Image (cartoon, rainbow, N blue to C red):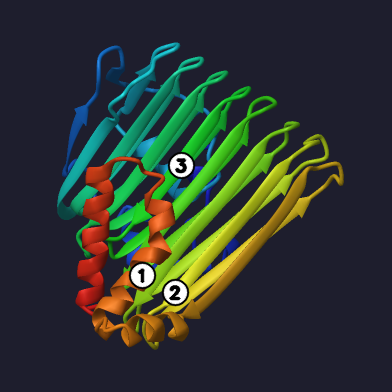
Amino acid sequence: MATAQLTLPTGREEAWRFTPLQKVISVLDGSVSAGSTIVRNILSSGGVKAYAENAVSPIVTPEDFAATLTLDKSPETLIIEIPVEYNGAEPIVIDRTGSSLGSVNFERIQVRAGRHSQASIVVHNSGSALLAEDIELELAEGAHLTFISLQEWENDATHLGRHQAVIGKDAKLTLIEVTLGGSTVRLLPRVNFLDTGGEIDAFGLYFATSGQHLEHRVHVEHDKPHCRSRVTYKGALLGNSARTVWFGDVAIRPQALGTDTYELNRNLLLSDGARADSVPNLEIETGEIVGAGHASATGRFDDDQLFYLMSRGIPATDARRLVLRGFFAELLRNIKIDTIEERLMARIDRELSAGGN
């Protein structure tokens, strides 16, 4: 689908109604020229192939305007090929550093995980950039892939991305998205199953401070029998103009017998004026499933927890930090890379200490 066939979003569309369009329109409307201001470094272990290729067809044709625009504008696609039965002890790391807001970067990545392979991929984003990206993850039969996307941008960056996964027979994807930086970040994790027995565990962590808009719109399409999905996203907001959006959509089609799915979103408001929108949605078209459910909650610090810690001599500032660490610890543990977990927690501590400024 060419972008000429799509209409530039106006903000009235359901998919864009939460997004501050005035903050992202320069990425979408051509008013800022396309260019390359992101430096990309790739660290991979033996046997994994990383190369660029032109005119690569998408695995799943996107419906989103930004993702479709990326297909049209990206000069090349980075291909990551993980061999059959590969078992890598060290993660494949794609480090991207932005240096300018003077042009829009259009980036495509396709990850192809071979049959019965086991691998981890980390995409780390930092610096200042205008980025539209399309990342596709293709898992062959029996593959186990962990994909970690880290948004540690400076607070002037804009990032629009689709993370599309297609999961083969008995394959399992662990998807982890951590968003701490950026002025506006809008990510669209998408999951399709190719055969029976596929699994997805999706985890998200975000911390918005004043002036930030962090948006995650998840869609899991269950149209094959006996597949499993778990979606867990948690966010914290600090600052009177901090804004987050989580949209979780799970569709269970009539042929998806034996589906087992659950989605959860939790938001912690740390100051007045912060706003978290949370929209869980289930579409169930068959009753012959293992289970399906969702939950969403937004609230403030637990006063009982703070009182308990403070009554034992812990200062109020340290008590808030400990509660927030506990709130996020479950998700961070899924990364299983100590240096990354420690760096992210240190940044969360700094954001909390700065008071959302």
**Foreground tag (1 vs 3):** 1
Q: Earlier in the sequence, mark 1 or mark 2?
A: 2
Label for residue 324? 1
What amino acid is at disc 2? Leu
Three-letter amino acid code of the residue under disc 3: Leu
C-alpha gap between disc 1 and disc 2 = 9 Å
The quarter in which the C terminus is drawn is bottom left
Q: Residue furthest front?
A: 312
Residue drawn at the location 44% of the way across and 86% of the way down: 303
Label 3 sits on residue? 175
Residue 225 in the image, given as x and y percentages of width and height: 76, 31
Whether residue 78 is visible to the viewer of this picture, yes or no, is yes
Can residue 20 be spotted in the picture?
A: no
Compared with 294, 103 (above or below) is above
Q: Residue at x 31, y 16 (%)?
A: 48
Q: Toward the viewer: 201 or 189? A: 201
Residues tagged 1 and 2 counted as in contact (Cβ below 8 A): yes
Vertical placement of 318 versus 103: above or below? below
Residue at image mark 2: 268
